[in-house]
Amino acid sequence: MLDHSDIPADKLDAIKTLAAFCVTTPFRTPIHKTPADHGVDTWEDVFFPSADGVPLDGWYVPAVDGESDKLIVMNHPYPMSRSGFTGHWGEPWNVVDDLEIDFVAQIAHLAKAGYNVLAYDLRNHGRSGAANGGICGVGRYEWRDCVGAKRHVDAHPRLSRMKLGLFSQCTGGNGQFEAIHRDPDLFDNVLCMLSPMTLSMVAMKQVFAGLYGIEDYMDAVIDEERKLGGFTHREMDPKPFAPSVKMPVLQFQVKDDAWTDNPRDGQEIFDLIGSNDKELFWIEGTTRRFDGYNYFGRNPEKMIAFFDHHMR
């Protein structure tokens, strides 16, 4: 269906806009905060390669009271960075949402609770390298970054001896599911994973198609996604990989997320996770997906209790 000459011009514009959303990366979110903004004065810049050689940039933040034997590896959603999101700065970021997302608050909570944190930017985000023509895979490319981060930990003289947990968020969570599926032995020693806001792109794009009035043109959306050189939204889905995730998992989702058809999508992903020790936590009282990204920065108790329980 590559000939779209029969589609009205306004519909075709909407189709192209929807196709580009969460496929292209039109801007980078800067590193707008550091651990010092939350009273954590010691950290170091780190860099290491992804599985396919893309240079990844991040921080290593030791526990505030001295480097411990527990390490959390943290990544982030599209189109953010390890520090969060700058929607409050205005254009171009507020086109997505006008909220500030502060992931450094999460890092600081963990460091003050006795955890070392390795937080890194995914490819095409933050300060990490460009790859795949700037296309985002919502996990389908980014799994290679998850593998690279784990290999970096395993090769490090100190980090390799630490108890290990994962904090894998949204696109980073989708990528982490696929990384575990592709190389289960690499992640065999991971004790647990906090997995916020994973999603299937079918759930998100179907909602936006309804808002744009193009729900009858999803095949044309797929054609446009292919023209951009990336995966289609039907291919950007963590569900095929979720059964391979066997470690203890805490998943959380915004229950009435206006960007997806939650609770259905979140529940379906959760049900497919292969772990016998898993919990799905619903954030209620908001329809804004981006409120979910700030949840543990503002309410760290459940996050810390989860890691304390599984990383004793």
Image (cartoon, grey):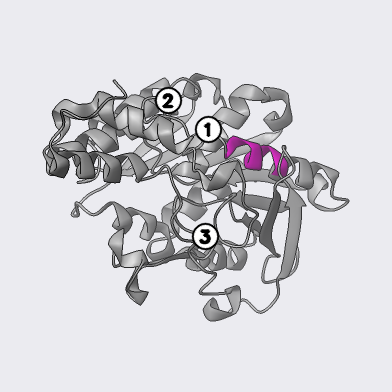
Residue type, numbered disc 1: Arg
Q: Which of the numbered marks, if any, corresponds to residue 235? A: 2
The residue segment tinted magenta is: 142-148
Q: Measuring from the top left, give residue 123's x and y in whole percent.
A: 60, 49
- At x 35%, y 68%, the residue is 87
- At x 61%, y 31%, the residue is 179
Q: Quadrant of the N terminus?
A: top left
Label 2 crowding class (10 Å Cα cut-off): few <14, some 14-19, many 20+? some
Q: Measuring from the top left, give residue 57's x and y in whole percent.
A: 68, 59
Q: Earlier in the sequence, mark 2 or mark 1?
A: 1
Reading the image, the residue beneath label 3 is 81
- At x 62%, y 55%, the residue is 120
Residue type, numbered disc 3: Ser
Quarter of the rendering containing residue 10: top left
Reading the image, the residue beneath label 1 is 140
For the residue labelled by badge 3, is the local secondary structure a helix, a strand or a loop? loop
